[in-house]
Amino acid sequence: MLPCLNEIDSVAAVVREAKAAMDEAGVAGEVVVVDNGSTDGSADAAAHAGARVVHERRRGYGAAYMAGFAAAECDVIVMADADGSYDFAALPAFLDRIRDGDDLVMGSRFKGQIEAGAMPWTHQHIGSPILSGLLNMLYRTGIEDAHCGMRAFRRSALSEMRLRMPGMEFASEMVVNAARAGLRIGEVPVNYRVRGGRSKLRTVPDGWRHLRFLMLYSPTHLFLVPGLALLLIGLLMLVALLPGPVIVLGRLFDIHVMVLGALLTLIGFQILAIGLYAKTLAVTLRLQPMDRTLRALRRVFSLERGLVAGTLLFVIGFVVDFWIATEWASSGFGPLNAVRPALFALVAMLLGLQVVFSSLFLFAIELQVREPA
């Protein structure tokens, strides 16, 4: 499977190389070139070289591949670029891993040989390692080169990978969704050569698309972890300073730090709630499988418990405020010095309201998008 956009300098040679590699490996198959709107005659050159050409008008790396996958008829699909950068001598190694039980086999340029000038220094030593490292940290794939363009997978695994991204982030989506689906992922060395023609890769925009996808696709790390951390830190500061100033390591922490604690508490809960909305929506729409975070939440949380907890928090804050008002009235409405309990009451009431309406919203998501029986 070769996506192609104005690769007249290399596409025919790549098609012939791919066909020769299949012949040498003793496997039957076809070379499918997905033309993504070429204007230089690439589609005709690919067809003359023996490829089946599929046309996809929607521009994008992912869009081209998804059109090709829909048209493919083989049990195993091998992906590569039409620019001549990948050495098809690695094809037998990919097929061996598939025969051994792998569902997705990734090429690793770093385990193979990278020709001088084939990959910019910034991509080889900064961009690719950082993005691959982030992907492994967030999704635990164990893949060294998560953005290698030469891959192979079983066609039967296609539905489990739930591929949707039309752009370059499609490369990350395939690995992430395969890992989330519990597919068996392998990796083999591939040699990376100087490409023919002009590169379509845009370093900063495409790198940002990958980074944006990796972060937004993981609400746990983007929202839940920082939100919970801010919430706990804020609550600690708020409760510790409620009785009065505290001296720590010779430093005085007073009302201003308590105000900061109140702010962190409210911001932290809001970020946490947004993360829960995102995870609940993704699971309800079956875009992502249920994970341990939501399983644990559903074991202890229900709409009714959320409403009770939120109402209780609001009542606690209201009672504290009512006590402050009563004390002020009994003193003849004189000077009032109850900033600490008032701040605590404000946070309790706001948190209570947020818990109530967040609970209602979470269950409204499930109710509105739940599939009919």
Image: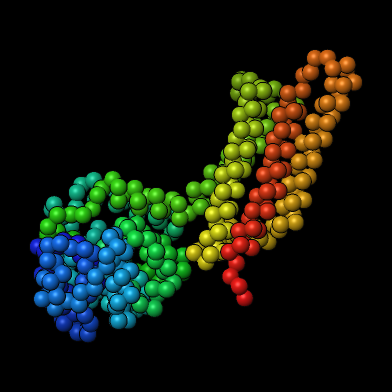
In front: 33, or 180?
Answer: 33
From this viewpoint, is residue 152 visible? no
- In the displayed structure, does residue 330 sit left or right of residue 201? right
In front: 225, or 66?
Answer: 66
- In the displayed structure, does residue 149 sit left or right of residue 350? left
Q: Quadrant of the N terminus?
A: bottom left
* Residue found 40% across the figure and 71% down from its top: 184
- In the displayed structure, does residue 128 sit left or right of residue 233? left
* Residue found 64% across the figure and 27% down from its top: 259
Across and down, in percent, residue 153 comes to 33, 73
User: 27 above or below 140?
Assistant: below
Residue 34 position by quadrant = bottom left
Across and down, in percent, residue 328 comes to 84, 21
Q: Quadrant of the C terminus?
A: bottom right
Residue 156 position by quadrant = bottom left
Across and down, in percent, residue 162 comes to 42, 68
Q: Residue furthest right?
A: 330
* Residue found 18% across the figure and 63% down from its top: 38
Residue 160 position by quadrant = bottom left
In front: 161, or 104?
Answer: 161
From this viewpoint, is residue 330 visible? yes
Q: What is the number of callouts on the image? A: 0
